[in-house]
Image (cartoon, rainbow, N blue to C red):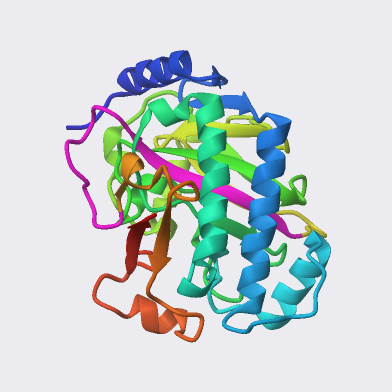
Amino acid sequence: MTFSFSERSKRLDKICKKTILKKKTDLISEGIIKKNNLLFIQEASKNLLYASILGSKKKLNVKKKFKNIIKKIKKKKPNNITHNGLVVPRKENSLEYALFLKSIFCFLSSTGLDKVIEYFVSPPQLRIKLGNKSKNFNASENIHSDAWTNYNTDKSYTLYFPIFGDAKRNLVTFFKPKKNFDPKWLSPKKFVDGSFISKHYENAKIDYKFGKFIVSDCATLHQSILKKNAEPRVSIDLAFIPKNIFKKPQNHSHVKFKEIENTGFNQVILFQDSFNDSLKKILSKKNKQSLHNREILNY
């Protein structure tokens, strides 16, 4: 079953009524982050990035300032950060990740989104875009829909917001359908193969800026933009599936909101993979999902 454009617009209306979100287009909404929530997320994100520099070592002489951490990341190139910028938790930084998740859940609670989300497409992750084009293929620099990935569905939404860094020259741009919408556009595909679909879209003129967050239906398209002299940006792109759509997970990466909402409060997610394990080795395993090898511990 697929949703029509009008059905998608009505579903976003319902989400907005239950949350602090306001519609900007038929399929894109926007909210304002409370200052205390943003500060909590910033500090938790900084600690998670710092732990990535440490790796499996006990000590590292670096001040926990954003610029110093970015400088070390560029130099050290931690192997738990993918070429497209996802910061992958390992067993050595499970505690920092737990506190990061706690900051995210406090934020979601303040917006009302905690009452809307049934599943995360995968456990929430931090993303860092260093401001320079990757030597490897970086799919997000193509106009795309998250529905095209193997881990997503055509019923999902994504929450976006910048945390630190340069959001003016290192940003995300959003696109809306010009006129007609074909649900077949959301079928899984390689991002480079979706270029013909972008011809049916136009710039939605959404401000990607600090202090605001964006929630969009996966029928919108988006693109990572690196302008001249772009500096690093740390952000969150959190894909989720609302309630009353699926009775069970559609993919092994999907995790029920209720299962991890107490992370950082009275539970921790313990990842089995170590900083000493290369990301290439982890992804070569049967599940081919960097966050799959985990265990939830309650205390």
- Position above or below: 131 against 164: below
Instruction: Tell me where residue 106 appears, x and y as whole percent.
Output: 55, 36
Instruction: Tell which of 221 and 97 is nearer to you.
Output: 97
Q: Is residue 89 magenta?
A: no
Q: Residue at horizontal 48%, vertical 24%?
A: 112
Instruction: Tell me where residue 240 appears, x and y as whole percent.
Output: 39, 40
Q: Is residue 175 visible?
A: no
Instruction: Tell which of 132 and 286 is nearer to you.
Output: 286
Q: Is residue 233 magenta?
A: yes
Instruction: Tell me where residue 164 appears, x and y as whole percent.
Output: 73, 50
Q: Residue at horizontal 53%, vertical 46%?
A: 102
Q: Left or right of 25: which side holds 39? A: right
In the rendered view of the protein, which quadrant contains the C terminus? bottom left
Q: Residue furthest front?
A: 299
Q: Is residue 222 visible?
A: yes
Q: Left or right of 206: which side holds 260? A: left
In the rendered view of the protein, which quadrant contains the N terminus? top left
Q: Residue at horizontal 43%, vertical 48%?
A: 266
How many numbered circles are shown?
A: 0
In the image, which residues are magenta? 232-253
Q: Left or right of 232: which side holds 161? A: left
Classify residue 179 by image quadrant. Answer: top left
Classify residue 18 by image quadrant. Answer: top left
Q: Residue at horizontal 39%, vertical 57%?
A: 193
Instruction: Tell which of 28 and 228 is nearer to you.
Output: 28
Instruction: Tell me where residue 59 appears, x and y as whole percent.
Output: 70, 81
